[in-house]
Amino acid sequence: MSRTDPGSEVSTESSAETRTEPGAKKARLVYLMGASGVGKDTLLGEVRRHRPEWLVAHRYITRPSGTSENCVSLSAEEFERRRRLGLFCLDWHAHGLDYGLGIEIPAWLERDQVVIVNGSRRALATARECFGERLLPVLVTAQPSVLRERLIQRGRETRDEIQARLCRHQQLAATLDDVDRIDNSHELRHTVAALQALLVTECPA
């Protein structure tokens, strides 16, 4: 397992080392996990702006999506119909909601692309069964003080609820000790650079 230095001076410009053209045999599904408020959706937005050769896949969720989320909102009926039609390669239920990843993801992997998605620890075992060696689980972390401040600024929860969420974040990190992780406590450019460094290691030329 690697723990990438967030301050590493790795260029965030496109490079031949991580560009995945057809036939490159570098297909990986980067499966991001992390506590709410750690900045996964913000990181995905930054990746889309600065690393267009990495394909960011959206999730399908049975709730309205926020402006910063990379997802498609569906009603429960819409979600169930798509599931019956086999239009999800992976789906799970959490916090009273249904989440799904579309069958476009295996199609992109068949074209030897690096695909990045906001995943879930609850579905990690199933994702490993589905994608095998192509799956690259990554835990996005942040220092407790940084995560606390982000949750306070978001304004959705009481201080007791925030404290409970911080405890769950620590428990999550403890249960995924064998998973690669990147620290998102600092500027986003450092997090993207850390992700690039990880992919250079995992997808050697």
Image: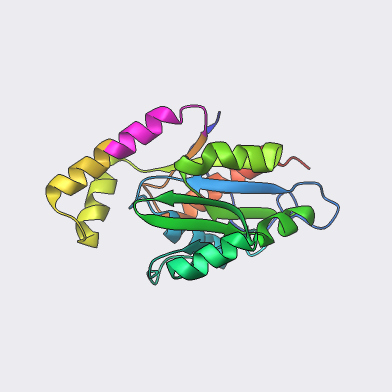
Q: Is residue 145 left or right of residue 44?
A: left
Q: Quadrant of the N terminus?
A: top right
Q: In this view, does 145 lie to the left or right of 63?
A: left
Determine the residue positioned at 73% across, 48% down.
Answer: 27
Up/down of 143 relative to 118, above or below: above
Percent position (x, y) of residue 129?
64, 37
Residue 100 visible in rendering:
yes
Residue 137 drawn at (x, y percent): 56, 40
Q: Residue at x 64, y 65 (%)?
A: 52
Q: Quadrant of residue 64?
A: bottom left
Q: In which quarter of the image is residue 165?
A: top left
Q: Is the magenta stretch mostly helix, strand or loop?
A: helix
Q: Position of residue 203 (x, y in %)?
A: 71, 42
Relative depth, front residue between 47 and 27 = 27
Q: Would you say residue 169 sits in the magenta stretch?
A: yes
- Residue sticking out furthest to the right: 23
Q: In this view, does 175 lie to the left or right of 115?
A: left
The quadrant the C terminus occupies is top right
Residue 51 visible to an observer of this rendering: no
Q: Does the magenta stretch include residue 99?
A: no
Q: Which residue is drawn at 28% across and 47% down?
A: 146
Q: Where is residue 193 in the image (x, y as percent from the top left)?
A: 54, 49
Q: Residue furthest left?
A: 159
Q: Which colour scheme is used?
A: rainbow
Q: In percent of the image, x 19 and y 61: which residue is there? A: 155
Depth check: 92 or 84 in front? 84
Count of numbered badges drawn on the protein: 0
Q: Is residue 184 left or right of residue 57?
A: left
- Range of residues picked out in magenta: 168-179
